[in-house]
Amino acid sequence: MHNFLHLCKIKINRKAGVKMNISKFQDLIDIALKAKECNRDIALELTVPEQKASEIIVVKNENIDYKMDYYCKNYNENLELNRCKEVKILSAEIIMYDTMLLLYKQKFK
């Protein structure tokens, strides 16, 4: 079991604004740390059991510590949910959710 605040000492080697297919828990940690450093949010793509399409979850910057603690306790090294291996984190991207939402609203007024 990991603890996110303890893992914050790990070197950050991810660039902001790039969608990354991730395969190991360390990849997710790197992205979360970079997002916190840049004061940005994270968009995660996850598999959904018995569904063809994946889903996107947005983690606002203020919730990154909380959400990463959850992932540390409930996901394995391969980014699979411990209690249901069919749920898996596929990719992560550092985003600016509020800006994206504002632009969307302006476009579709």
Image (cartoon, rainbow, N blue to C red):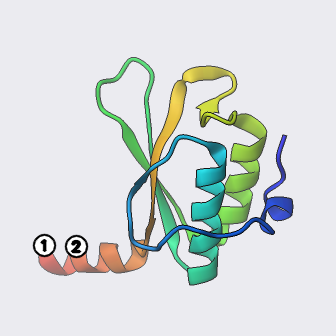
Q: Quadrant of the C terminus?
A: bottom left
Q: Residue at x 65, y 69 (%)?
A: 33
- Callout 2 amino acid: Tyr
Q: Residue at x 61, y 21 (%)?
A: 84
Location of residue 25 in the rendering, given as x and y in whole percent from the top left corner: 65, 45
Relative to 28, say whether 106 is above or below.
below
Relative to 25, say whether 39 is above or below.
below
Locate residue 73: give its quadrant: top right
Give the residue at mark 2: 104
Q: Residue at x 52, y 33 (%)?
A: 88
The residue closer to the viewer here, 12 or 84, is 12
For label 2, the crowd category at 10 Å Cα-Cα, with few meaning under 14, some 14 to 19 and many 20 or more, is few
Left or right: 37 with respect to 45?
A: right
Location of residue 1 in the rendering, given as x and y in whole percent from the top left corner: 84, 40
Location of residue 75 in the rendering, given as x and y in whole percent from the top left corner: 68, 36
- Callout 1 amino acid: Phe
Q: Which mark is residue 108?
A: 1
Locate residue 60: give its quadrant: bottom right
Left or right: 72 with respect to 30?
A: right
For the residues labelled 1 and 2, say whether their Cβ atoms are less than 8 Å apart: yes
For label 1, the crowd category at 10 Å Cα-Cα, with few meaning under 14, some 14 to 19 and many 20 or more, is few
